[in-house]
Image (cartoon, rainbow, N blue to C red):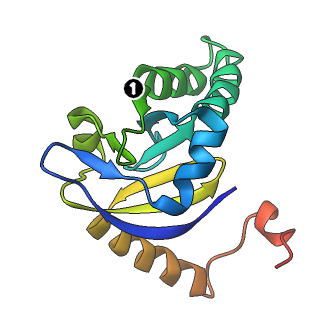
Amino acid sequence: MFRGCTKLSVDNKGRMAVPSRYRDRLVGLSDGCLILTLNPLDRSLWLYPLPEWEIIEGKLAALSDFDKQGRRAKQMMRGYATDCQLDGQGRILLPNELREYASINKHIMLLGQGNKFELWDEKTWQKLREEWLAEVGSESTEPSDSLKSLSL
């Protein structure tokens, strides 16, 4: 569904323009209703079309409150979930608290991840991308079982 990597800017009001190549799809899928939340695994944000978020919300609800990791995932993802609506210019407002969490200032990277987007501070993304690429190329890094089964 969503793929590719796009460099974007955040304006002085904290708004980001969604690239035009995604807008029609987002309007068709969710009438421009999006959910922005923090990524509890990395210092980035996740942006979901509302129907995709509702699937995630169901999966989160199924997690036990007696499992600490499940409870934390629910607290973080649902607790910081913010409704966003594409405006007439195809922009969404990134709340200050979420921008601070992901260290997002002026320049960001938007990564399509199939059912959602990841939003990263540009410099953080570049630094981590280089680290991850170095790890992948390292002889000492053993692929996980799920990666071993991936045929490209």
78 over 23 or under it: above or below: above
Which residue occupies 55% across, 56% down? 22
Residue at the spot of label 1: 80
**In the image, 144: left or right of 31?**
right
List the single residue furthest toward the front: 88
**Looking at the rendering, which quadrant does residue 150 occupy?**
bottom right
123 over 47 or under it: above or below: below
Q: Dividing the image into 4 quarters, which one contains the N terminus?
A: bottom right
Q: How many neighbours does mark 1 have within 10 angstroms: few (below 14), some (14-19), or many (20 or more)?
A: some
Q: Dividing the image into 4 quarters, which one contains the C terminus?
A: bottom right
In this view, the residue in front, 11 or 79, is 11
In this view, the residue in front, 41 or 142, is 41
Which residue occupies 30% across, 40% down? 94
**Looking at the rendering, which quadrant does residue 71 occupy?**
top right
Q: Secondary structure at mark 1?
A: loop
In this view, the residue in front, 4 or 92, is 92
Residue 57, horizontal then vertical, whole percent? 63, 23
Which residue occupies 65% across, 41% down? 28
Residue 42, horizontal then vertical, whole percent? 43, 50
**In the image, 6: left or right of 103?**
right
Residue 7, horizontal then vertical, whole percent? 36, 69
Q: Amino acid at mark 1?
A: Tyr
Which residue occupies 12% across, 49% down? 12
